[in-house]
């Protein structure tokens, strides 16, 4: 059994060393991330805003490409090529000048196109790389973008609200704990205060030798009469 424990022992030793080396790095990472965690609701909202802006810019870019095509529009019949994907569907067409082109960016708005299909396209004469399916514009992407934004904020909104609520609860708990501690200290000091040298106040003041002064006076008076 002992020879079998050697490799296991060495493995545990390597793991221990790796843990010791990684511990300072993890501690530094936690120290850097901890302040950001206090702003988690704001960070989530900012991420949602950034993604929304990027989605809106997609529509802006599509609208700008359509404007260029409309300014110098020409039409042709293109063949849909194989090997494309959903974002990039490649077509091959012949321009009015007789050049055969296959745009590197693919054709815009390729929904429903299949390899080998012939489709009418519109392109920019000054920049034939800008080509779209005839009759389609940037509005083709309006519904997908709006649905994407709706789904995004359906996640971002509740997440930011839940994180903000959790932060408020922690803050209220910390404030309540601090207030309880401040109120406890004066109460303890008032309850434990005695007279000088630990003796009671005037109501419970004792005479010498621990006897009460009021009880001693009648006995002294009786002695004098005798």
Image: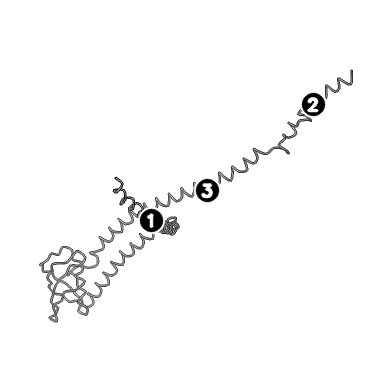
Residue at point 65%, 40% (across, down): 190
Choose between 137 and 15: the one closer to the eye: 15
User: Which is in the foreground here, disc 2 or disc 1?
Assistant: 1
Residue at image location 29% in from the left, 49% down from the top: 3
Location of residue 184 with respect to 89 vertically, above or below: above
Q: Residue at x 26, y 63 (%)?
A: 142
Residue denoted by label 1: 17
Query: Considering the image in quadrants, where does the N terminus appear?
Result: top left
Query: Spatial distance from mark 2 to mark 1, Cα to Cα?
Result: 80 Å
Rendering coords of residue 79 (x, y %): 12, 70
Q: CA distance from mark 3 to mark 1?
A: 42 Å
First along the sequence among labels 3 and 1: 1
44 or 57: nearer the viewer: 44
Pinpoint residue 163: horizontal percent, then vertical percent: 41, 52
Q: Secondary structure at mark 3?
A: helix
Q: Nearer the viewer, residue 63 or 16?
A: 16
- Determine whether, in the image, residue 223 is placed left or right of residue 175: right
Tell me: residue 67, above or below residue 223.
Answer: below
Q: Which residue is mark 3?
A: 175
x then y, percent, for residue 61:
28, 70
Q: CA distance from mark 3 to mark 2?
A: 53 Å
The answer to whether residue 57 is left or right of residue 34 is left
Residue behind mark 2: 214
């Amino acid at each position: 059994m002992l020879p079998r424990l050697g490799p296991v022992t060495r493995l545990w030793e390597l793991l221990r060393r790796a843990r010791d080396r990684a511990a300072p790095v993890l501690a530094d990472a936690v120290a850097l991330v901890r302040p950001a965690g206090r702003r988690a609701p704001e960070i989530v909202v900012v991420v949602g805003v950034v993604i929304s802006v990027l989605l809106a810019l997609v529509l802006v870019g599509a609208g700008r490409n359509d404007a260029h095509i409309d300014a110098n529009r020409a039409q042709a019949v293109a063949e849909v090529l194989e090997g494309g994907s959903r974002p990039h569907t490649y077509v091959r067409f012949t321009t009015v000048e007789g050049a055969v082109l296959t745009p590197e960016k693919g054709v815009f708005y390729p929904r429903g196109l299949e390899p080998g299909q012939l489709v009418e396209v519109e392109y920019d004469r000054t920049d034939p790389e800008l080509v779209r399916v005839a009759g389609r514009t940037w509005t083709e992407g309006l519904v997908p973008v709006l649905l994407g934004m709706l789904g995004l904020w359906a996640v971002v909104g509740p997440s930011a609200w839940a994180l903000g609520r959790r932060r408020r609860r922690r803050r209220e708990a910390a404030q309540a704990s601090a207030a309880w501690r401040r109120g406890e200290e004066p109460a303890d000091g008032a309850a434990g205060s005695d007279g000088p040298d630990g003796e009671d106040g005037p109501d419970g003041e004792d005479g010498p030798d621990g006897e009460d002064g009021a009880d001693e006076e009648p006995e002294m008076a009786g002695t004098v009469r005798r």
